[in-house]
Amino acid sequence: MSNDFVAGFHFVFDRWGDVLQQKTLEHLAISGEAVAISILIGVPLGCLLGHLHRFSFIAINTSNLARALPTLAVLSILLPYTGIGDTTAIIALVILAAPPILTNSYVAVDQVDADTIDAAKGIGLRAWQVLLRVELPLALPLIFAGIRTAAVFVVATATLKGFFGGGGLGDVISNPASFKISGIIGASYVLIVMSVLAQLLFLGIEYLVTPVGLRRRRLSSPLRRGGVRPATEVGDDALATSQLEQAQLKQAQLEQGSITR
Amino acid sequence: MIVAVAALAAKAPVIPGSDAYGKTSKCVKDNGTFCWDWVRDRWSGTVGPALVQHIQLAVVAVVIGFAISFVLALLAYRARWLVPPVTFLSSLLYTVPSLAAFYILVPITGINDFTVEIALVSYTLLILFTNTLAGLTGASGDVRDAARGLGMTPTQSLWRVELPLAVPTIVAGLRVAVVTIISLVTVAGLIVPDGLGAVIYTEGLKKNNFNTALIVGGVLCIVLALAADALLAGLQRLITPWAAARRSR
Amino acid sequence: MPVDTGKTAAPLEFRNVTKRYEGTDAAAIKDLSFVVPAGEVCVLVGPSGCGKTTAMRLVNRMIDMTGGEILIDGKSISGRSPADLRREIGYVIQHVGLFPHLNVANNIGTVPRLLGWDRKRIASRSAELLELVGLPAEMGKRYPSQLSGGQRQRVGVARALAADPPLMLMDEPFGAIDPINRDRLQNEFLRLQREIKKTVVFVTHDIDEGIKMGDRIAILREGGELVQYDTPDAILANPADEFVARFVGADRGLKRLALTNLEQVDLDEVTCVREGETISPGTWVDNDIVVVVDGERKPIGEMTRDVSSDSAVTLGSARPVGASIPITASLRDALSLMMTESIRPLLVLDGEGRVAGWVSIDQINKAVRQVPNESAAIDAAGIDLDK
Ligand SMILES: Nc1ncnc2c1ncn2[C@@H]1O[C@H](COP(=O)(O)OP(=O)(O)O)[C@@H](O)[C@H]1O
Ligand SMILES: [Mg+2]
């Protein structure tokens, strides 16, 4: 059985030139296209909503909802309507990738410190200048974390295209008849390396766009992985003075005025 | 909803050799966009069992994955040095594309549900470990200080304070994990003849893209994921009334 | 409602206590010795970072000391299991640290549950404590997130009192509350303390809070060095050194006046007449004012000597009463009011609004110069801990 793993390596080296190189490039092309479209949709929309601090419910729940749309299921449902081909695959991959990018962009801009924005407005920046010069730079790391999540998902999932009309490394993986188990394992090696490289590439970008002062904390946080944001607790002390408290406060003031004249 | 979508559909090409569909109606023979009669005929023999298998595969993976992650998170909570290696390993497992993971395991464990479960469990680890740990460490310093100051032993504090407070975060992780796994079980159907993925693959893709099987498999899969998510969300509201009290303020 | 007063309070003693945090050269607490008699409030006060919290947390072994000994009720805490020890010591911190997942009743019942009390006893104890800290019983079902800051603080105190500990530790308990509510909570706690008479170690960086809350004040300096340990009155009257004098503030004379209220002063006698009465010249005392009162000795007007002469008093010849002040007010309040009244004496009224006496600037002068009645610096060896 360990022979299969060795054979996988042999396959990679022997067939790189005539099969794998082309399939890898196809794979990257379709992935790149899907991620690019997702960025074009998700980043502007997310940033705009975050800037407005509106529609948080929609912005945050799109990625929760999208997670419940397995790409294979989406492909299956689309196939009867859009037929076999790149369009079907791209639509399915954008449905996979755009939501985490949108949600992260929204959260990234939405959570920029209100005092910082106040200060920016205070020194006379216009709304669009606030967005471009203050919110966006501070939001970039989180936006790129969303893109990273999406890119890794897409590289892995683009393999399904091999089962739906062909193209990319999925062609090899879905075709044991031609490539045998060694071919499938060899293609899997390439796929894994691609995923890890995509991960590292975007981690690098994330690091570079992180303002120096925030670097250590942001990057090492594994919680941003896969769009997993642990549920956050609302601060308790925000609500120190309730109505009741204000009533008591009034009463106390009255009592203090008991020195009669 | 399915009917409405079907009405919009373009006609698929007529496929030769249509007796491959078994008992055949005209709709099935012509590969119509959606054939209710096929669903009716094949529900008890194919679709229903696939749905049940799908649920079983997902539940087993999440239960085992949660058990492992939970223990790892408890250990890492006490011995913080465990956090980086566990996070690194589970991140790596999470990064490996699911199909690649399935196939890499095949030479070792063969083409069967066991292989599928190993791969699925490896996917849950990052999410569940991360969220469980985040939940445990999420209790504020004041709350932990108070627990200790009132005379709780570390174990009492863990079970009575940190863990209950972690429940919302843990359930949030479980929701992500369950939905992810339901999705991946579909992919596993491309390899093993189980679950809704197998309906899509063997009844749909393998049979010249038989539309009805593709749509039924896909829609059931989405419905299942949404239902599981809603179920967990409801469960969480039930077991953490205090979190609801906080939200409603 | 009376609390079960079995072993209600225990004395606390620090004996040459030293604490050095790992990785630091300077000690956070250096050779600290003092005694808090049972049932008294000892305030640890000093600038931020001087070691107040450290000293307090040594008592319930949240931190372990490097050297010395701490005794509660004459017994050293060193051999005790920290968890058991802590269950016998009430603990309140600035941010309260209520458990968000437990309702108020269950928060209060935390220590009783750890001690294995049965459900019924815990429930009745929770209800009793809610009442004690002045919260309605229905509040037991609320979650902490549904309470205001002041209410949470009260629940925190109730939770600390749940198992009727003989000793309470409070670390800046009212530090995060707005000034007016803080004042309220302070007064409530003082009222509560009169009822429950616990030994309390109270940490604050606010000297005014210390003066108000403390039976005794321990003033610490950076490095946990005890500079002065005495009653608030004695510290204000005789600061041990320049540091203490600066810390208590240049207005320490005024602060001292705030400690004394008019009940504790020998008030000047007031000449009272009823309407229609005649006053013989011999009855004039001290100042020239005579107060016209009604049947219950409540003031209705006043007049000066030359107006009244020998004739019968009529209200028509009187003018309205000048400034008055309740007998519960402090000398500081009296002085303040006097300032706005051109230093003339103030009429002091008792709880029912009846005339109690005059207070004049002379009495305030006398009070300022007075030596503190008991300078209470306690010699550790001199106190009987078994009393
Ligand atoms: N865990 C710790 N490790 C090291 N030094 C500490 C620790 N806690 C407090 N310190 C130091 O001990 C000194 C006293 O701290 P603390 O007791 O918190 O002061 P206070 O409560 O009076 O503000 C400070 O200098 C502080 O920096
Ligand atoms: Mg402190």
Image (cartoon, coloured by chain):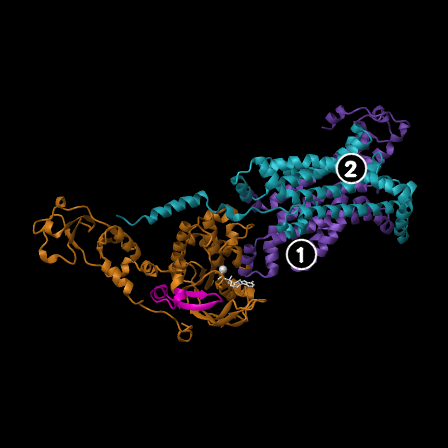
Q: Is residue B126 left or right of residue C316?
A: right
Q: Amino acid at mark 1?
A: Leu
Where B130 falls versus B183 (above or below)?
below
Under circle 1, the secondary element is helix
State yes or no: residue C367 in magenta.
no
Q: Give the quarter of the image for residue C256.
A: bottom left
Q: Residue at x 44, y 59 (%)?
A: C205
Which chain is disc 2 placed on? A
Q: Colour of chain B?
A: purple
Q: Which residues are magenta?
A: C217-244
Q: Amino acid at mark 2?
A: Leu
Looking at the rendered structure, whether the residues under marks 2 and 1 are on a common chain is answered as: no
Q: Residue at x 35, y 60 (%)?
A: C250
Q: Residue at x 64, y 52 (%)?
A: A217
Under circle 2, the secondary element is helix
Where A95 falls versus B159 (above or below)?
above
Where C234 falls versus C180 (above or below)?
below
Pick the front one: C192 or B249: B249
Q: State the cyan chain.
A: A
Q: Give the quarter of the image for residue C261.
A: bottom left
Q: Which residue is mark 1?
A: B74
- Residue C61 drawn at (x, y percent): 54, 66
Q: For the residue with label 2, is its CB less than 8 Å from the closest atom of ligand 1?
A: no
Q: Which residue is mark 2?
A: A72
Q: State the orange chain.
A: C
